[in-house]
Image (cartoon, grey):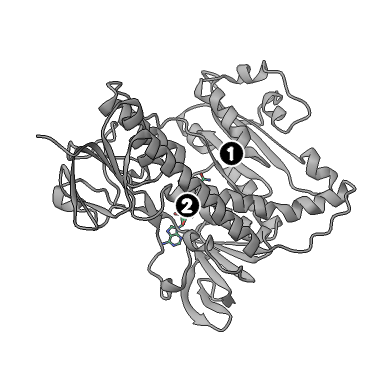
């Protein structure tokens, strides 16, 4: 049987674009790709990239205050959201064009259209045309999930925050995960009065407990009104915004309510159920280690598969798929020891490997942890502290986990992640000479365990 394409990709985000480009340019496959919205997906259009630019934008007030302590005569006249938004839009246009350009030069045919599956080798496009492909890759990502509370339609998600015409004076952020914590800090830094509700007892569930506590303290000290053990009961429209009734019995009008209560895989309406593509409880497409679904010609990568929902992981899944199916180089994506960062402020949380709690459950450990005021901000009179922490296996001496709460922790954990991935021992860290004066030098100068377990 002949097909129009060797590969048809549905979804132009990080995972889909990488797979399409590698299959076409490195392995000579005939590739088509359909994207219903903008090329680049969540990461580029409404996720990592605009979020990080907003983190930068929101960090200036503190930097300007500190500059005064360093002798600079700085007057901050105020923040103009309109100016920032316009530049952000221009930057996203540039990135989208770069993604399109990359696909074009790789020889991929792009369809700006929604696509659905009609059989294991056939894709129907929104204009009624159909294309056939030997292999189909699903890479449609995820979408914010808002729980079914009364008035849920009034809630914004991170998607809409990037598109606000003006910043509200007050915002309620709901959730305690990556997005909630990052947006609470961003909005706070931009001058919005921020309250954050989290239903559990401590934010950032799943991260190292000590690090979570450290981040929570800093978010609070930075000015976010963080309320753990609190949830929204209902929302209704009110003069000046949204009236929120909370589980602690209080009521208050917020200019806007931003829900960051997780994301769901984008698997609905693709025709998957009819073809027998197995879905999990969360709507995720179930795949094996090769990213192959229960229908052999159909593969899936990225957030749609709900494995580790991070851009670099989706990229690796897409690349491994293309090398395996089209390059004669079978390999499975490696999901072990993936480092990540939560871009909170003033300190980010960088993490790789096991939390102290996970490591304890596996056997005897030593914990090396230190907190201190970083030189740069301590000089300016700030009181916040950074945390450097290593979790070490008492038997093998391997560093099982590294957790950093500090400015630029995302940059530091990238490098610490190499050592941990290589299986470095505590003694390998110790014999590495410090770079002085830095914050990260503490990672190689902690001599005595803080505790053993
Ligand atoms: P997370 O899964 O990280 O967090 C969801 C939060 O919402 C949790 O605090 C959860 O509470 C809470 N929650 C879930 N359901 C409800 C509910 N019904 N009512 C009230 N609260 C609820 O999701 P995010 O949306 O923050 O982020 C999605 C994914 O995107 C992340 O897992 C991450 O993989 C990725 N991401 C990565 C970033 C990075 O690398 N810096 C940045 C942003 C996103 P509980 O803990 O109690 O379940």
Q: Secondary structure at mark 1?
A: strand
Disc number placed over residue 238 in the picture, else none? none
Q: Is residue 363 above or below residue 134?
A: above
Check disc 1 and report the residue beneath it.
350
Q: Residue furthest left?
A: 1
Q: Is residue 147 left or right of residue 378?
A: left
Taking the spot 80% from the left edge, 38% from the top edge, the residue there is 375
Position of the N terminus, as image quadrant, is top left
Q: Residues within 10 Å of mark 1 (few under 14, many from 20)?
A: many
Q: Picture coordinates of residue 295 (x, y %)?
A: 17, 40
Q: Nearer the viewer, mark 1 or mark 2?
A: 2
Q: Is residue 287 above or below residue 174?
A: above
Q: Picture coordinates of residue 3 (x, y %)?
A: 15, 37
Q: Nearer the viewer, residue 58 or 211?
A: 58
Q: Is residue 310 visible?
A: no
Q: Picture coordinates of residue 347 (x, y %)?
A: 66, 45
Q: Nearer the viewer, residue 55 or 193?
A: 55
Taking the spot 14% from the left edge, 52% from the top edge, the residue there is 274
Disc number placed over residue 45 in the picture, else none? 2
Q: Is residue 56 left or right of residue 115?
A: right
**Total marks placed:** 2
How far apart are labels 1 and 2 at the CA level? 24 Å
Distance from mark 1 CB to nearest ligand 1 atom below 8 Å = no
Distance from mark 2 CB to nearest ligand 1 atom below 8 Å = no
Ranked by sequence position, the earlier of labels 1 and 2 is 2
């Amino acid at each position: 049987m002949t097909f129009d394409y060797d590969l048809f990709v549905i979804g132009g985000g990080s995972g889909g674009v990488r797979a399409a480009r590698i299959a076409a340019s490195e392995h000579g496959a005939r590739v088509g790709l359909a994207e219903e919205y903008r090329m680049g997906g969540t990461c580029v259009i409404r996720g990592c990239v605009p979020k990080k630019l907003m983190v930068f934008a929101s960090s200036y007030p503190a930097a300007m205050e500190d500059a005064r302590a360093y002798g600079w005569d700085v007057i901050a006249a105020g923040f103009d959201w309109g100016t920032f938004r316009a530049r952000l839009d221009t930057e996203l246009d540039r990135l989208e064009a770069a993604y399109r350009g990359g696909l074009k030069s790789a020889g991929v045919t792009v369809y700006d259209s929604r696509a659905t599956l009609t059989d294991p080798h056939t894709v129907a496009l929104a204009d009624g045309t159909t294309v056939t492909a030997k292999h189909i890759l699903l890479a449609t990502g995820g979408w914010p999930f808002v729980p079914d509370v009364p008035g849920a339609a009034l809630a914004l998600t991170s998607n809409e925050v990037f598109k606000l015409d003006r910043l509200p004076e007050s915002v309620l952020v709901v959730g305690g995960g990556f997005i909630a914590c990052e947006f609470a800090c961003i909005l706070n830094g931009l001058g919005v009065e921020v309250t954050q509700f989290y239903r559990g007892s401590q934010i950032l569930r799943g991260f190292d407990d000590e690090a979570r506590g450290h981040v929570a303290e800093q978010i609070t000290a930075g000015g976010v009104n963080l309320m753990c053990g609190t949830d929204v009961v209902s929302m209704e429209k009110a003069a000046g915004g949204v009236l929120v009734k909370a589980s602690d019995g209080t009521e208050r009008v917020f200019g806007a309510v931003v829900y960051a209560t997780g994301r769901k895989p984008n698997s609905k309406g693709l025709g998957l159920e009819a073809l027998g593509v197995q879905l999990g409880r969360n709507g995720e497409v179930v795949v094996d280690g090769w990213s192959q679904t229960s229908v052999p010609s159909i593969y899936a990568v990225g957030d749609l598969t709900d494995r580790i929902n991070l851009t670099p992981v989706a990229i690796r899944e897409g690349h491994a798929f293309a090398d395996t199916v089209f390059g004669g180089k079978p390999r499975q994506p490696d999901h072990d020891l993936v480092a990540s960062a939560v871009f909170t402020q003033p300190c980010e949380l960088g993490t790789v490997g096991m939390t102290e709690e996970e490591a304890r459950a596996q056997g005897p450990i030593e914990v090396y942890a230190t907190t201190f005021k970083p030189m740069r901000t301590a000089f300016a009179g700030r009181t916040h502290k950074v945390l450097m922490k290593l979790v070490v296996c008492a038997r093998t001496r391997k560093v099982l986990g590294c957790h950093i709460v500090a400015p630029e922790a995302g940059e530091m954990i990238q490098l610490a992640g190499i050592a941990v991935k290589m299986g470095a021992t505590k003694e390998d860290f110790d014999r590495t000479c410090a770079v002085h004066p830095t914050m990260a030098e503490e990672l190689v100068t902690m001599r005595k365990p803080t505790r053993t377990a």
